[in-house]
Amino acid sequence: MQISIARAVPRPNAGIIKDIEDEDNKKGFEPDDLTAFHQLVRHLTADGDRRAAGAGRKARRTLAEMTVAGQRR
């Protein structure tokens, strides 16, 4: 049986790093996170629009449009 030296050596300052990460997470989203999220939403919206147009329909945009049963556009 082989023993890994990575498991035998404890990470230095592991507790301190975790505390720093926890503090950073409490601050909320960073601008880069929000930019990536907005890009994803724009991509998904454009993809949905293309799919709806390909099926001869218009993508539903409002909650009222989405909840009307059997509504076709």
Image (tube, rainbow, N blue to C red):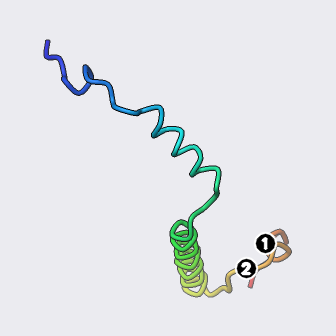
* Quadrant that contains the N terminus: top left
Q: Residues within 10 Å of mark 2 (few under 14, many from 20)?
A: some
**Which of the 4 image quarters holds residue 57?**
bottom right
Residue 17 placement, left or right of 27: left
SS class, disc 1: helix
| Distance of label 1 from label 2 (alpha carbons) | 6 Å
Front residue of 55/44: it is 44
Question: Exactly how many numbered labels are in the figure?
Answer: 2
Residue drawn at point x = 41 percent, y = 33 percent: 14
Residue 27 placement, left or right of 46: right
Residue drawn at point x = 82 percent, y = 72 percent: 63
Q: Is residue 27 above or below residue 54?
A: above
The residue identified by callout 1 is: 66
Tell me the amino acid under the disc marked 2.
Arg
Residue drawn at point x = 53 percent, y = 66 percent: 33
Q: Residues within 10 Å of mark 1 (few under 14, many from 20)?
A: few
Q: Badges 1 and 2: C-beta atoms under 8 Å apart?
A: yes
Tell me the amino acid under the disc marked 1.
Met
The residue identified by callout 2 is: 60
Residue drawn at point x = 54 percent, y = 39 percent: 19
Labels 1 and 2: the sequence-earlier one: 2
